[in-house]
Image (cartoon, rainbow, N blue to C red):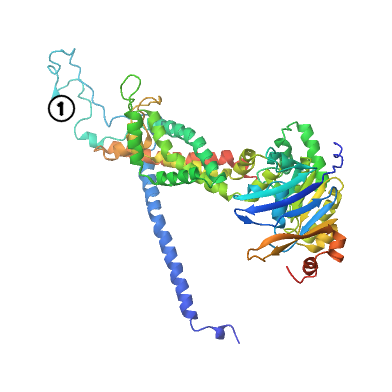
Amino acid sequence: MSLKSSVSPNYARRKAVDLIMRGLVLIATGLAIVPLVLIIGYVMIIGGSALNWEFFTDIYQPPMTVSMPNTGPIDPNDPFANLDLGALVGSEPATGQAGAGDEKGADILEAPPRGGVLHGIVGTMLITTVALLIAMPIGIMAGIFLSEFPDNSVATTVRFACDVLSGAPSIIVGVTAYILIVNAKGPDGQPLGFTGIAGSIALTFLMVPTITRTTEEVLKLVPEATREAALAMGATTWYSTFTVVVPTALSGIVTGIMLAFARGAGETAPLIMTVLGSNVLMTNLLEPMAALPLITYRYTESPFPSENTLAWGSAFVLMMLVLLVNILVRIATRNRLRMR
Amino acid sequence: MTTPPAPTKSTIHIRDLKPYYGKRLAVRPVNMTIEPNKITAIIGPSGCGKSTVLRCINRMHETILGARVEGQVLLNGENIYAPDVDPMLVRRKIGMVFQQPIALRTRSIFENVAIGLRLAGINDKRVLAERVEASLRAAVLWDEVKDKLNQPGTALSGGQQQRLSIARTIAVSPEVILFDEPCSALDPIATMKIEDLLLELRKQYTIVIVTHNMQQAARISDNTAVFMVDTDDGVPTGVLVECNPTSKVFTQPDDPRTEDYISGRVG
């Protein structure tokens, strides 16, 4: 009996169902990556075109400069006495006065993009790095606890809390940080106010659950036999965990940290309520600071096209920054991973 | 090279040992003696508690969640289950080699052996090099790996990894070495090498080996303990039916159940 004559009656139907299901899966996969491609493509095309050297080296510049006409000393009793308001709003060109060379009125809508987001890059790096430095030890240690001592009420509670927190809307985290830190009374009786460090702490709330749960999951993947081998040599649980189990799972832990960094760097809501934003370069974590997502948030709705460009550009820079940090950390940990 | 440690004469007496998993008694009370510088084989069908009893001998049983032990295991007369005994110290004197060869993939071949020494606080490079070489030689692995000590442990074959595990265990100078089915993941040639190695190690260490390969027990062991599964009261529980010199177990066993098992009628 040949192969073809052995066909069962439902053969054609089975082939058809297989084909249809494959098609459906393919279509669904395609639909799933459409938003990704759209977002990345859009940001790259519009944001990428905003980039130039100045964009990385300069801070915010207003769309155009309007200088005050020099009208001599201002009289404190009547400050507007000598002021030609018309020259400022550009209704009618003033006649040969100082300031007549400025761009005016509707020109502002055609003003070329200028300024950069150096203050945002610096702010985001500082805030996120400090947040990561706080979140990393807490998250990794908690993850180790959950994986190595899995069955007790503390672990169950922490695991549940982490899951809830990692799904919590970030605006809630922002409000919490606002009440607990920004609005808290300092030693002088005044509220502590908007500060970079408050933003870092808010981001920590969001990072710790991610790091904790990823660390736990990857540590669980390390074969039990590996732990037993260490224990059977007379190692303490601590030694076995830190010299054998953690190095084996290092790449997974690094991935968790990177996820947390990417999430933290892109968060906007908690930062609005904690660091406020700034148009100048601030490096003091005890003052309000700028951050890339805040620049995007603030200037997307600006009426001035040049500021819109700034928003797109900073979105692009944020994306690239996360990517860059990712690649750098992978390179840094690669030597240890090559041992696999 | 340091001289090999002098042969130890470590005897283990197991008294009324009752391993539990939660509330379930895994093996009926075990009483047996493990003689020094001999190979004691533990054989029996699957689920009879061979590995459980073995793991009780160096307190590895209790590392499983919910597992606990009643009774005594005496190492040269000292109860390793006494309340003031640290399991870590027990495990350094009574080493263990597992079924699955364990080469730590994040460490080089050298570090795979040195890890136990570092654990003991030995960090002197020269001492480490000497002890690692001695251990690898004792595990008959030195000639195969001496040129690639810096490669990861996983670069070795399964049989080599198992000898690497043995070298790691030897490195911390235990008195007793427990083997939990060390050859069941290996091919016949690698198995033969391990068996030759066990016969060599017998001169210095007290050895206990769990195996489900009766021929292996017959080939290498001096004494054999036979465990069976007892389902008399409805719950399958392991039970030690016989512990005698291997030649006697395989020719004129005391217990009819042993004969049934060895002749292939059960198990």
Where is residue A80, by image quadrant?
top left
Horizontal and vertical percent position of residue A91: 13, 30
Q: What is the chain identity of the residue bearing mark 1?
A: A
Q: Residue at x 42, y 40 (%)?
A: A206
Determine whether, in the image, residue A20 is placed left or right of residue A141.
left
Horizontal and vertical percent position of residue A93: 15, 27
Residue nearest the viewer, comparing B102 with B179: B179
Residue nearest the viewer, comparing A164 with B70: B70
Q: Residue at x 63, y 66 (%)?
A: B234
Determine whether, in the image, residue B237 is placed left or right of residue B189.
left
Horizontal and vertical percent position of residue A136: 50, 36
Q: Residue at x 13, y 17 (%)?
A: A82
Q: Which residue is identified by label 1?
A: A93
Q: Amino acid at mark 1?
A: Pro
Please determine whether, in this image, residue B119 is positioned above or below residue B164: above
Please determine whether, in this image, residue A76 is positioned above or below residue A6: above
